Amino acid sequence: TIPHTPIKHWTLPAARCGRSLPRAILLLIMRRSSYDTRTAYTITVDPYDAQGGKLYYDSEYTQEVPAEGDRVTVYTGDNFTVYAKPNDSFAVECWVVDSNSAPAANTYQFTNISANHTVSVKWVELEEVSVSIKANPNSVATVTATSGNNTATNTGTNSFTILEGEQVTLTAGTISDTRFKFNGWVIKGDYTLVSGGTGAEEFVIKANENLEITANYTQVYRRIYLENAAG
């Protein structure tokens, strides 16, 4: 490909009197006049530790950014995105953009570029966390916690281990004892109320630490009215 170099001036061969410039030169002028004449800027992608993952220039992860870093030419008004693909048990801790920290995400985008920029990624190694579940009382319903292929239940294997940050879905199953109703989840002592009822109740949380989960049930008291049948 021909570099997008701004055109300052043209130096053309002299044409003889009564003759036009050759067709090939005219075509070249027409083609060159369509080239990008905007101001060029440089995006510097700093070196990164490939142990934590890789950076890419595309969302399909086919154009890899060299681990030793790279410099990319962009132009005024362009957008430019870097894509992060963490390795197993790693995540993006943050981006550092022009010496300032930017929030963790698997992409970082410069928009409407009007200056040079630098960008680098910081990885964090994820720790394992445990998830356990039970019901209170334990016999009135089956409750489960699931994350990916992992499942724990109060009536069987009641715990599993996953990487921090993964989502866990809690499900309060159908109540077998109609004297009780679902009354919410207790998660490490923090009471989280979910609407009551006898059907399944779902609640999604993120496992940023070890989770001890209890599905709370309360007994329903019904009033019974007796009629006096005596005449």
Image (tube, grey):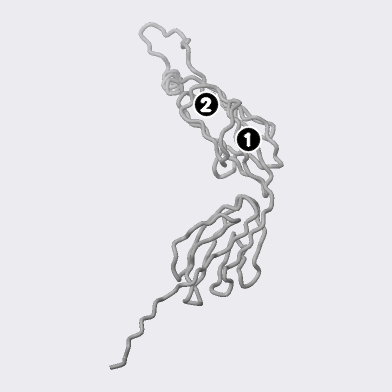
Looking at the picture, which amino acid does disc 2 mark? Val
x, y percent for residue 128? 69, 53
Instruction: State the separation of the CA atoms marked 1 and 2.
Output: 20 Å
Which of the 4 image quadrants contains residue 99?
top right
Looking at the picture, which amino acid does disc 1 mark? Val
Which of the 4 image quadrants contains residue 134?
bottom right
x, y percent for residue 92? 62, 41
Decide: few, some or many residues near mark 1? Use Cα within 10 Å; few <14, some 14-19, many ≥20. Answer: many
- Report the mark closest to the observer, 1 or 2: 1
Q: Residue furthest front?
A: 231
x, y percent for residue 185? 53, 61
Decide: few, some or many residues near mark 2? Use Cα within 10 Å; few <14, some 14-19, many ≥20. Answer: some
x, y percent for residue 175? 50, 73
Q: Residue furthest top?
A: 17
Residue at image location 55% in from the left, 65% down from the top:
215
Q: Residue furthest left?
A: 231
Question: Does dot 1 land on a helix, a strand or a loop?
Answer: strand
On the picture, is 96 further left or further right than 13? right
On the picture, is 190 further left or further right than 25? right
On the picture, is 63 further left or further right than 224? right
Q: Is residue 23 among the parts visible in the rendering? A: no
Classify the position of the N terminus by image quarter.
top right
Residue at image location 44% in from the left, 65% down from the top:
196
In the displayed structure, would residue 47 be above or below residue 88?
above
Residue at image location 56% in from the left, 54% down from the top:
190
User: Which numbered marker is on residue 74?
Assistant: 2
Q: Is residue 91 among the parts visible in the rendering? A: yes
What residue would you read off at disc 1? Answer: 121
